[in-house]
Image (spheres, rainbow, N blue to C red):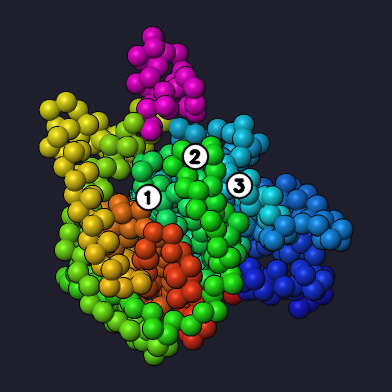
Amino acid sequence: MSDNHQELHARSLTELAAGLDGGEFTSVELTQSLLERIARLDGQLNAFITVTADEALAAAERADEARAAGTGGVLNGLPIVHKDIFCTSGVKTTCGSRMLDNFVSPYDATVVEKLDAAGAIFLGKSNMDEFAMGSSNETSYFGPVNNPWNAECSPGGSSGGSAAAVAARLAPAATGTDTGGSIRQPAALTGTVGIKPTYGRVSRYGMIAFASSLDQAGVITRTAEDAARMLGVMAGFDARDSTSIDHPVPDYVAGLSKSVKGLRVGVVRQHFDEGLDEQCGVRVHEAIAVLESLGATTVEVDLPNLDLSVPTYYVVAPAECSSNLSRFDGVRFGHRAENAEDLMDLYCRSRGEGFGDEVKRRIMTGTYVLSAGYYDAYYLKAQQVRHLIADDFKKAFSDVDVIAGPTSPTPAFRLGDKIDDPITMYLNDIYTIGANLAGLPGMSVPCGFVDDLPVGLHLVAAHFDEETLLQCTHQYQQHTDWHLACPEAFK
Ligand code: GLN
């Protein structure tokens, strides 16, 4: 490998694909260079729970052979990272928890299987909030992740490790999951691109369940074009996921070049009310102005029930998690307490020891809202409000193609600042949760900086219209260079 390959980490997935195709370097060389960066730099980030160096190099060798033989999929030889919520056969899947600290899945998640079949090389598993419950990566059993832009700040969560790895150029792409904002908020806080597709677009099979009616897999990259490449592989019907939807997968890359001329962009009045950092608001307005300068038109839209989305989510998500996490009982999966006196003691102590505080808080809240006597007042009511929120979006989409606003109310906050105040932490997701409650696709794209910390523009589209999100963000990135900025320590 010659000297000019030193800069491979700075290239996007698309650029790396072109380099591999052109024979400029091999997948083994590329994989080695990124593994070397991970070994050298991840100590500053804690973005990885597991690094699969040997497996990755072996896979890269196979990818190079496949290329030489003229076979190999669309991502052949390209290194990526998986959030540690996706089951990977033979490699530990912890979900950021003590409960699954030593869990090795006997099978691959569909997302893992598909990316593998396309030839992607997986470098390791990324750190995350415990069972994806959190907005700062601080609930991880493996410790918080540091934001590459400022090590004292959070990279967001729960896909904080994936976002930090991509922002720090340790990998060009990483998978993530988003139940209330866990792809888009960390993307915003680290200056990366994150897309949460329509509910049902990407299979949830083998993705450890948090809140099943809200969870959706997606991807974090540095460019919209890279996200389009990844999503094209990940999306599609899966008979093993009963909520997967059989809807044709368009060629996302082909749709990118379409101009945004005439595109109707909805600007939500409520998004710019109190609660939004003033400078973040300015950056977002500037980003919307760029779309206007490219021929998009803006229309003011109303989401009158937006302020109900956080309380609604914090009834629905805990309810579902209390049910999903009941499977961790010390018998079938994960941590088992020692010397149990009887079965009840085994359940209680295994769960007591295996779960962290935030997960316990959610399980208790969820069990409460589902209990006889409170079910109607909380759970049923939340389901009704969820419909109102979905209806608001439906109305808005009769006038606009895409809704634009901030991804997060503030830039990255300091580690430790919000962890003892759940309500403030929960309010971080005010702009992202609505899309989960309504099952809509949402995407965050870097749109500038406030005090040297990145800010994200958030876009939401109608069901199954990921194409418009990708097209719009791609066009935006063709005319801005925020996504090229690299944190100083990771150049
Ligand atoms: N921050 C939200 C929560 O704590 C969302 C997490 C997620 O999307 N997985 O539940």
Q: Residue at x 42, y 27 (%)?
A: 328
Left or right side of 190 for 124: right
Kindly identify which numbered label has been placed on residue 241: 2
Q: Image height check: is 25 above or below 294?
A: above
Residue 470 locus on image (x, y percent): 48, 70
Spatial CA distance of label 3 from label 1 is 19 Å
Residue type marked 2: Asp
Residue 224 locus on image (x, y percent): 52, 71
Quadrant assignment for the N terminus: bottom right
Spatial CA distance of label 1 from label 2 is 17 Å
**Does residue 403 appear in this view?**
yes
- According to the picture, the residue beneath numbered tag 3 turns out to be 112
Q: Nearer the viewer, residue 74 or 463?
A: 463
Q: Kindly state the secondary structure of the residue where label 2 is placed.
A: loop
Instruction: Point out the tag, 3 or 2, that comes first from the N-terminus.
Output: 3
Range shown magenta: 324-351
Kindly identify which numbered label has been placed on residue 24: none
Mark 1 vs mark 2: give the one in front: 2
Q: Residue at x 71, y 55 (%)?
A: 119
Q: Residue at x 20, y 35 (%)?
A: 369
Kindly identify which numbered label has been placed on residue 179: 1
Instruction: Classify mark 1 as within 8 Å of ligand 1 or not, answering yes or no.
Output: yes
Q: Residue at x 48, y 83 (%)?
A: 259
Res 38 → quadrant: bottom right
Mark 3 vs mark 2: give the one in front: 2
Q: Kindly state the secondary structure of the residue where label 3 is placed.
A: helix
